[in-house]
Amino acid sequence: MERRKFLNLGLVAAAAVLAPMTNLHAVNFRETKPDAWKAEKSPEAIKAMFGAEPTKSDKIKMVAPKLAENGGSIPITIKTDLDVKTVALFQDANPRAATVVFSVPEGQKVDYSFRIKMRQTALVTVVVETKDGKLLSTGKEIDVSIGGCGG
């Protein structure tokens, strides 16, 4: 039993030492693109974040409920097989349109699931920036019956 504990601790220690050495290049978009986080509407936030308007694409899959009974916890899943550099989500329900931005590690596929808050019904837009510089998007309107931001 003691040997197993020792081996497990050794594995944890090795992981702790090697984890900081992984080559992750996360960008702090709040610092590098502050105007995107101040924008109240998605088109303004997208323009401030990426400098251009995206093209609609069916190569991005967004799974979200058509009707969210509780705006305080709306599940969103984003998937694509494209070679992606950045993934961002925008919505027009809250005072600020930019919701979340992910830097995608080299060679990784996008299959992200998370939850967002929305205080009212609105369009949710996903924008991906590919490694070759293309901006692509997809969107879906989500009806919110009970607001999640104090509504």
Image (cartoon, rainbow, N blue to C red):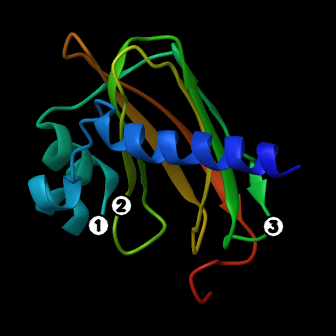
Viewer-side residue, 53 vs 64 = 64
Could you tell me how far apart the alpha carbons at marks 2 and 3 are, in whole angstroms?
A: 21 Å
Label 2, residues with CA under 10 Å away: few <14, some 14-19, many ≥20: many
Residue at numbered disc 2: 97
Give the CA separation, mark 1 to mark 3. Answer: 24 Å
- Return the disc, 1 or 3, that comes first in the chain's sequence: 1
- SS under mark 2: loop
Residue 84, quarter of picture: top left
Residue at screen point 20% across, 61% down:
30
Mark before the other along the chain sequence, 2 or 3:
3
x and y percentages locating residue 81 in the rendered image: 52, 11
Classify residue 12 as left or right of residue 20: right
The amino acid type, in three-letter code, at marker 1 is: Glu
Q: Label 1: which residue?
A: 40
Q: Are marks 2 and 1 in contact (CB under 8 Å)?
A: yes
- Relative to 135, 120 lies left or right: right
First in sequence, mark 2 or 1: give its number.
Answer: 1
Q: Residue furthest bottom?
A: 150
The label shown at residue 69 is 3
In the rendered image, residue 27, in percent from the top left (x then y), is placed at 21, 45
The location of residue 57, given as percent across then percent down, is 45, 17
Q: Give the answer, above or below, for where 39 lies relative to 89.
A: below
